[in-house]
Amino acid sequence: MDAIKSYLSWWVIPHQFEPEDLRYRQVRLLQAVLAFLQVYFVFFVLLNSLVLLLFDMALVDLVAAVLVTAVQRYTKSTLNIRLAGQLTVGLIISFLLVYLHVAEGRNYSYYWLTIVPSLSFFLLGGRQAIYINLLFFSYVIGFLLWRAPEWSEHSFNLASLFNITLATTFLVMTIRHHERTRAAAQIILEDKNKQLTLLATTDRLTELYNRSHLDHMLGHLVSQAKRQQQPLAVIMIDADLFKLINDEFGHLVGDQALIELAKLLRNNVREADILGRWGGEEFLIICPQTNSKEVAELAERIRVNVGNHSFTNLQLNLTLSLGTAVLTPELAAASGKSTSALAVELIQHADNALYKAKHGGRNCVVSSSY
């Protein structure tokens, strides 16, 4: 067991490539391919020289084993993945050409041709792999047309079984690596898309939805409310005298207050509600299937809970002014306006209500009359 661990560690190629980097997978495939080839060539050196007495093939296998080791050491010392891939593919093709000439169709030797396309495309890339495969298989076909008629028939023997077994193992290993690489790339792509979506829709400071996403969701929910003939309410929220907090305590404390306020608002909205930062110290809550009475009660509950909350690092209570507006099915049907126009009008009414709340003493809820 220790000998196996020592052997495997000797073949490990240390690198700092990230999993999303193609070279990460190429290094792993190179490790596996070069280790496999070394075991294969050493095995067939022994088999051809001691059992089958094919000394010419044993010599070819010995030279190939030495070259594989040289490529492995070069890759480990330089980490030149591109050149290492070219050397590995070139070594395999060179060995196969020599082997095909020497074997003359014996022992199912041509079964090994199946490994070239998958390996070359992964290690070399599309264009280079296409050229190499065209040249390689053109030569092989020409060689077969020229020499195959002269070959005698051969029986299936132990070497044939080994060739089929090992070539299939190599092919399965390569295909499995392709599939694992594709699956890993898909996971990485999905994670990146989630991160990009989060960045595009989330306010960086409060981690609530940003204004752009709120606009998008409001348009979608207005359209849905019209279609389903359901009311849609919004609550516009402004933190009272927040500029004084920034002036007295500094913007860092003000930012912490906004973060804490965002968490408090998140804990007070309902599951179906959509909460976001509208801008500065203003927040917006979109409330699907909510009538004027329900939205007023929700706004009042938020106002009371925030007013009773002790904010960290602040020596004063933070109060809110809130304006509510409701788009009823009757208003949506009677207006004849587009979805975007209705969304803008709904926000305007909530903003007007908020203006009245701020200029009517603050720390209160005002509902739009439309």
Image (cartoon, grey):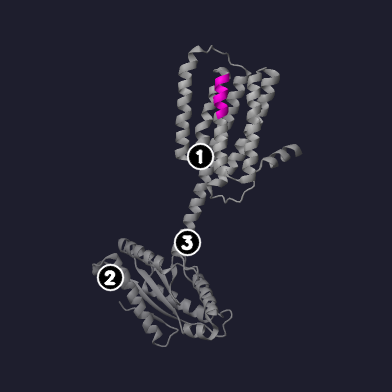
Residue occupying the point 47% across, 79% down: 303
Pick whichever of labels 3 and 1 is earlier in the sequence.
1
Pick whichever of labels 2 and 1 is earlier in the sequence.
1
User: In the shown orientation, is residue 95 left or right of residue 147?
Assistant: right
- Residue that carries the numbered disc 3 in the rendered image: 198
Relative to 159, say whether 228 is above or below: below
Kindly indicate the quadrant of the structure image that contains residue 41. Answer: top right
Q: Nearer the viewer, mark 2 or mark 1?
A: 1
Secondary-structure class at tag 3:
helix
Q: Which residues are magenta?
A: 94-102
- Residue that carries the numbered disc 2 in the rendered image: 331
Alpha carbon of mark 3 to alpha carbon of mark 1: how far? 35 Å
Secondary-structure class at tag 2:
helix
Residue 72 image position (x, y, % from top left): 63, 39
Residue 128 image position (x, y, % from top left): 47, 38
Quadrant of the image containing the C terminus:
bottom left
Q: Which mark is residue 124?
A: 1
